[in-house]
Amino acid sequence: NSAQPDASINNANAAANDVRTSGRTNNSEGKNEISERSVRDSVMLGITFLIYLLLGSYVFSLYEPDMDFFKAVYFNFITLTTIGLGDVVPKSKKYLLVTLLYTTIGLSLTTTAMELAANLLKKIHYFGRKIENVSNISVWFGGKKMTMKKLVQHLGDHMNVPERELKDLNLDVFVKSAMKVEAGVIKTLRKPKVTMRGRSKYPSALHYSDIRKSGESENLKYIDEKRESSIS
């Protein structure tokens, strides 16, 4: 009989470990999927920009009298990247509207491509760096800024967190742990609930009526009993 509860406990622990492992695996797969998606989008946008540049250059070479294909590629590149040297300019007034429309769409495409490239370069720049001095990092809210230390302090005051815990909080360690949660290394930063020994039968506040109903009131000893016995 005693082996059955042990087997049930082992099965429950194994199931809990499987749930944790599957949760971490799902988080890791989600992060990898997002990373692969961003890389795929960047590659597709780069290919789209290249096709747009070459196709526009071919069209320009058809109606611009002083532009061959390679000169049109040069003109489109310096125009869409907002370099704009001005040494090559379109001269066909008949197709000026087509040129303006092509340039406007191309600038929007270039802006999106530059934004993705900037984000990628930022990730490469900060890759492998240690997280330190988080408390002095400034967070902007509209036109005003606040340090992370002050922000956490105000949040703790709002949530009635004891001041001692706020002072003992190491933001560098906290951010590192939070990054591990995002990466799926650990499940959560929530502290486990502490259960007092001997209180498992009484989930709510303990009251004398609970003990009386449970039949344990006969085992209670009152302080007045000892006092009355000593007086008598």
Image (tube, rainbow, N blue to C red):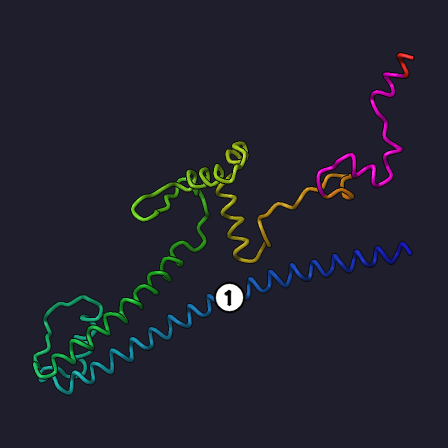
Q: Residue at x 92, y 12 (%)?
A: 232
Image position, residue 36 (x, y; %) = 46, 69
Q: Quadrant of residue 217?
A: top right
SS at mark 1 in the image = helix
* 144 or 200, nearer to the observer: 200
Left or right: where does residue 20 sit relative to residue 158? right
Query: Is residue 74 one of those drawn in magenta?
Result: no
Total residue callouts:
1
Image position, residue 60 (x, y; %) = 16, 83
- Magenta stretch prevailing secondary structure: helix
Where is 111 relative to 73, above or below?
Answer: above
Q: Quadrant of residue 122?
A: bottom left
Left or right: where does residue 112 sit relative to residue 104? right
Residue annotated with mark 1? 32
Q: Amino acid at mark 1?
A: Asn
Where is 208 relative to 134, above or below?
Answer: above
Q: Magenta residues, as a range?
A: 204-228
Image position, residue 160 (x, y; %) = 52, 37
Q: Quadrant of residue 216?
A: top right
Q: Quadrant of the N terminus?
A: bottom right
Residue at far top of view:
231
Image position, residue 120 (x, y; %) = 37, 62
